[in-house]
Image (spheres, rainbow, N blue to C red):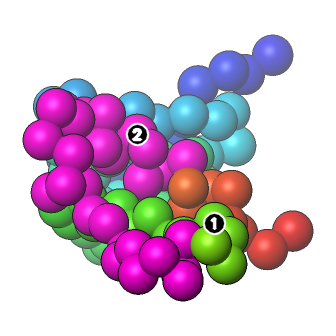
């Protein structure tokens, strides 16, 4: 049983990336950037990068809005490493996708 992704010809994969899925195919001449978390196939001649994470936390209740709390970003959480910020952003994007 196949367990690993399939990279086609001339694929460039940079450091600290994660590519998962037996059905994942990385098309020829694609470039996968550093710290990318990839769980789906990529078309040929595609460049996949992760931009600086920008996590926005929205207020959870009406009380927060009344209290005047603003949306917060990762800059408000200086103890977060860039890798942890990228993982949190990945989880939020994954959870917010319509099913």
32 left or right of 2 in image? left
Q: Which residue is mark 2?
A: 87
Task: Give the quadrant of residue 30.
Answer: bottom left
* In front of the other: 58 or 27: 58
Label 1: few (<14), some or many (≥20) within 10 Å? few
83 in magenta: yes
> Which numbered dot is residue 60?
1
Which stretch appears magenta?
64-91
Residue at position x 19%, y 55% in the image: 76
26 left or right of 51 in image? right
Residue at the limit of the structure toward the right, as seen here: 99
Residue at the limit of the structure toward the top, as seen here: 1
Quadrant of the frame with the N terminus: top right
26 left or right of 30 in image? right
Residue at position x 58%, y 25% in the image: 4
Residue at position x 30%, y 72% in the image: 45
Q: Is residue 88 above or below residue 65?
A: above
Q: How many marks?
A: 2
Q: Is residue 60 above or below residue 88?
A: below
């Amino acid at each position: 049983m196949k367990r690993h992704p399939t990279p086609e010809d001339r694929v460039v994969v940079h450091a600290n990336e994660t590519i998962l899925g037996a059905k994942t195919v990385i098309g020829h001449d694609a470039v996968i950037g550093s710290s990318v978390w990839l769980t789906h196939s990529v078309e040929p001649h595609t460049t996949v990068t992760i931009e600086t994470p920008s996590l926005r936390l929205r207020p959870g209740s009406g009380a927060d809005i009344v209290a005047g709390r603003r949306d917060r970003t990762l800059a408000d959480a200086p103890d977060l490493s860039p890798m942890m910020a990228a993982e949190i952003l990945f989880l939020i994007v994954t959870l917010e996708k319509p099913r």
